[in-house]
Amino acid sequence: MAFASSIQKGQIPVGCQLCEGGNKIQWKCITCDSLMCDKCKDGVHLKIAKDHKILNINDIGKQEVSKDTIIFSDVKCDDHSQQACCLYCNTCNKFICPKCITKVHNGHELIEEEDYNKGKVEMKTKQKSEIKLEISKEYTADLISIHDIAVCSDGSMWMADNLRSKIKHVKLRENRTVVIRSLNTKIYGIAQTHSNNILVTTTGETKLQLINTMTGEMTDSRYDVKPLIPTSIHVTSDHRVIIGAWSGGKAFPVTGRRVVVVMDQEGKQLKEYEHDNHNKRLMTYPACVTCTSNGNICVVDWLDYDSKGRVVVLSPGGDILGTYTGHPDVNTKDEPFIPLGILTTPSDNIVVTDTNNHLLHILSDQGQIITYYNLHDMGILGPYSLALSTSGTIYLGCVSADGSPNTAKSKLYELNYSGF
């Protein structure tokens, strides 16, 4: 692990130096070098040193003054009171101990003590300022919700409303979609093949189904994950087919198998991802999959029936490179991270929709947060499905609010983007 040397540092937490209660350190006096709790900062220290400079320990690494340093092992962990901190999580803006890393902060941007005290915790903000999104075009679709999108080489598009078992082949015209063909079928995943046909997953079938874009005929494909049932699909630039799958039954709590399978163009299985080196499940329910150009597999992993979830990034060898569970600024207990759509950009950044919060989360190719983007401020509500256009823009399909009438029309946006 990259931070092994840091984890070995002092494991005995130090409490407030001004009281005997062993309270958690929250402040440091830069003038007299004292570490203190909140109570002593406003009590004992204030009485004897009114003119001293005091900083919150979470702000020390962001100062330019070289003497504004802190020893991580002097800080008690917020969540594990008997553990000393060893790293700073720049994603969550807090000090963390070894126990925190694997349980909560795996995949977050972690800062070591030396870099923290050099003031290197502003990297994420600089990246965020370079990122831009703008609406290029807006379309009204002939569906209530757009749960899946696949873009054909001629610029036409297949889109699906899974709740109402509708899938439509459309052309984009001015501010609306024109239907070429409509099918009544429920799908759970969609992808375009290199022959410009469409692969979909359908209820209960172990084989992916193939839609001929010229005739609309749906037939069995050569891609079969029997005895598993596919949940999601992605076709790579080198013609491999990545399939999320499970063994059926009750989705939650987890029983049976939850797997990502990689096949070649002929349907031969190349790789299977299910457990880590400790025989622990890699995922709970692989609802959506994609991959980067260097072969990292990115999985939208649902954790319960409310679609609360995470993004798991696996190396080609099956190691977990990162796990992203949302950003603490916007994802809380009341507003959890609900990842639904995912894509990777040509520069190998990962883009994920957070539907109920009207956000896009932008991650590195290993699942570390770069920034999040508030789509509500742009007038975009209910972002769900994602696809790259033939010209390199992003298509974003939205879903209607719960309880919307059958006359409701969903929105499709074409977005120009830069910086990721």
Image: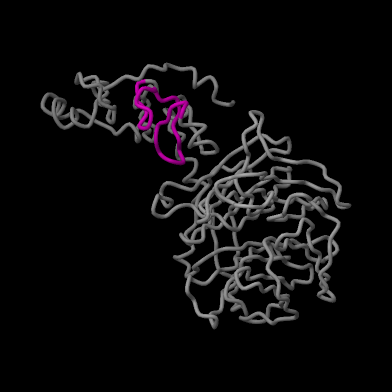
Q: Is residue 137 left or right of residue 16?
A: right
Q: Which one is nearer the viewer's eye here, 117 or 227? A: 227
The answer to whether residue 364 of the structure is visible from this angle is no
Q: Quadrant of the N terminus?
A: top right
Q: Main secondary structure of the magenta part?
A: loop
Q: Is residue 183 left or right of residue 310?
A: right
Q: Is residue 277 left or right of residue 22?
A: right
Q: Position of residue 160 (x, y in %)?
A: 66, 70
**Stretch in magenta:** 74-99
76 drawn magenta? yes
- Quadrant assignment, res 275: top right
Q: Is residue 109 above or below residue 306?
A: above
Q: Is residue 183 above or below residue 274?
A: below
Q: Residue at x 20, y 18 (%)?
A: 20
Q: Which one is nearer the viewer's eye here, 163 or 39? A: 163
The answer to whether residue 172 of the structure is visible from this angle is yes
